[in-house]
């Protein structure tokens, strides 16, 4: 099996789990270069991981041997970089979110579809073992028809986190807890329970933080399936707890909490997997294993080889970003709003 040559663009906070995954995937992928603007970042990449480095992204676009790029730069740079990658014929694995606005997110997905390049999104919670087990249980009909879906993300970030220039701003990040933190669990919930039809939400900046965007959200959700549910997301819950998705069906219920899963069925069957460990939900946002990133990147490489669709893809990310925008719009309007199609 020939190795796929990949370039990584960006070497900031999100770089480490990708780098460690690529080190584990040396039989499948070759890192052609890592693009980093600062000299200290390039030196760190070389000394810690041994990858070639460059400060020129043009070098990537002009190298026909590079088949794909992993983009790890701030959200407000995504559309420009993905458009350049598409023009150069490079497949893209993009750190969430798509971009800072829904219009830019839609344009980003559209350019990839027009140029027929693959667009994978770094929403790695789908690859947790407990999440995979729950997906299989739903596929097998163990819970019956879903009647309720509740999502809790009780995370913590200290004020120092938001004191970093651009962090939690509309201009650079596009939003607060929803687009930056809760998007992972929200994507997982949508992948399990289907699309949301309407929302009624409150999104605020709590007294815990000084920041431009929201750090506390509560919403009532109505799913297209008819199920009703709730979302509570925050980075103001000290010291941070495992996120939770609770599903209630006509045959039983399931609770996915961090890396743990509990299934309780009305026929008496029970199943328990893993433990509810807090992974990245506390003061250190990178306190988690790279195992889920590894599986996500492995799947992206397989999609390139087979011509199949990567998971999750641009349309998946657009679906959750449409929901996030509707939550924020509902809060601003003070009334329930429909969630537009993606």
Image: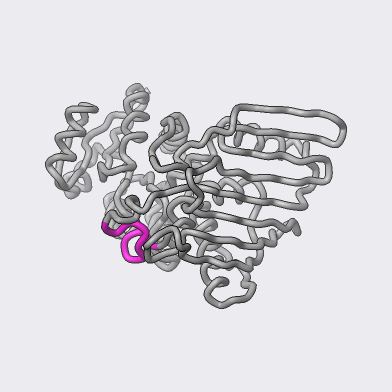
Where residue 175 sits, quadrant-wise, is bottom left
Residue lying furthest bottom: 333
Image colouring: one colour
State whether residue 6 is above or below residue 103: above
State whether residue 76 is above or below residue 3: below
Question: Which residue is at a point 16% across and 47% down the rendered structure image?
Answer: 37
Question: Which residue is at a point 23% across and 34% down the rendered structure image?
Answer: 32
Where residue 179 sits, quadrant-wise, is bottom left
Question: Which residue is at a point 36% across and 25% down the rendered structure image?
Answer: 25
Which of these two is toward me, 327 or 211? 211
Residue lying furthest right: 267
Which of these two is toward me, 85 or 161? 161
Where residue 51 sits, quadrant-wise, is top left
The N terminus lies in quadrant = top left
State whether residue 329 is above or below residue 145: below
Residue 326 point in image, percent of width and height: 55, 67
Question: Which residue is at a point 62% across and 75% down the rendered structure image?
Answer: 335
Q: Main secondary structure of the magenta part?
A: loop
Magenta range: 165-174
Q: Is residue 333 magenta?
A: no
Residue 324 point in image, percent of width and height: 52, 61
Residue 215 point in image, percent of width and height: 46, 59
Q: Determine whether, in the image, residue 241 is placed left or right of residue 94.
A: right
Which of these two is toward me, 36 or 79? 36
Residue 201 seen in this snapshot:
yes
Residue 83 seen in this snapshot:
no
Q: Determine whether, in the image, residue 201 is placed left or right of residue 285.
A: right
């Amino acid at each position: 099996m020939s190795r796929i040559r990949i370039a990584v663009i960006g070497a900031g906070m999100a770089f480490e789990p990708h780098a460690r995954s690529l080190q584990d995937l040396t039989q499948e992928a070759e890192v052609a270069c890592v693009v980093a603007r600062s000299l200290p970042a390039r030196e760190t990449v070389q000394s810690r991981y041994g990858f070639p480095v460059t400060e020129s992204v043009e070098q990537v676009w002009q190298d026909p041997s590079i088949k794909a790029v992993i983009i790890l730069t701030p959200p407000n740079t995504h559309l420009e970089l993905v458009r350049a990658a598409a023009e150069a014929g490079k497949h893209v694995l993009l750190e969430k979110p798509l971009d800072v606005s829904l219009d830019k997110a839609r344009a980003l997905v559209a350019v990839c579809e027009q140029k027929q390049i693959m667009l994978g999104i770094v929403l790695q919670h789908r690859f947790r073992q407990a999440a995979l087990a729950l997906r299989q249980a739903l596929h097998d009909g163990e819970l019956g028809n879903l009647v309720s879906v509740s999502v809790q993300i009780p995370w913590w970030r200290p004020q120092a986190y938001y004191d970093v220039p651009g962090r939690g701003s509309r201009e650079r990040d596009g939003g607060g807890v929803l687009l930056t933190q809760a998007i992972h669990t929200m994507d997982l919930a949508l992948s399990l329970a289907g699309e949301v039809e309407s929302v009624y939400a409150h999104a605020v900046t709590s007294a815990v933080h000084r920041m431009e965007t929201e750090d506390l959200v509560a919403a009532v959700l109505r799913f297209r399936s008819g199920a009703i549910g709730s979302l509570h997301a925050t980075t103001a819950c000290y010291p941070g707890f495992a996120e939770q998705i609770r599903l209630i069906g006509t045959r039983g219920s399931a609770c996915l909490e961090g890396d743990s899963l509990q299934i309780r069925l009305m026929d008496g069957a029970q199943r328990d997997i893993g433990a509810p460990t807090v992974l990245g939900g506390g003061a250190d946002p990178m306190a988690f294993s790279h195992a889920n990133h590894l599986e996500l990147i492995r799947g992206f490489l397989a999609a390139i080889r087979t011509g199949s669709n990567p998971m999750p893809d641009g349309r998946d990310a657009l679906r959750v970003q449409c929901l996030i925008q509707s939550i924020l719009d509902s809060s601003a309007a003070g009334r329930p709003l429909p969630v537009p199609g993606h």
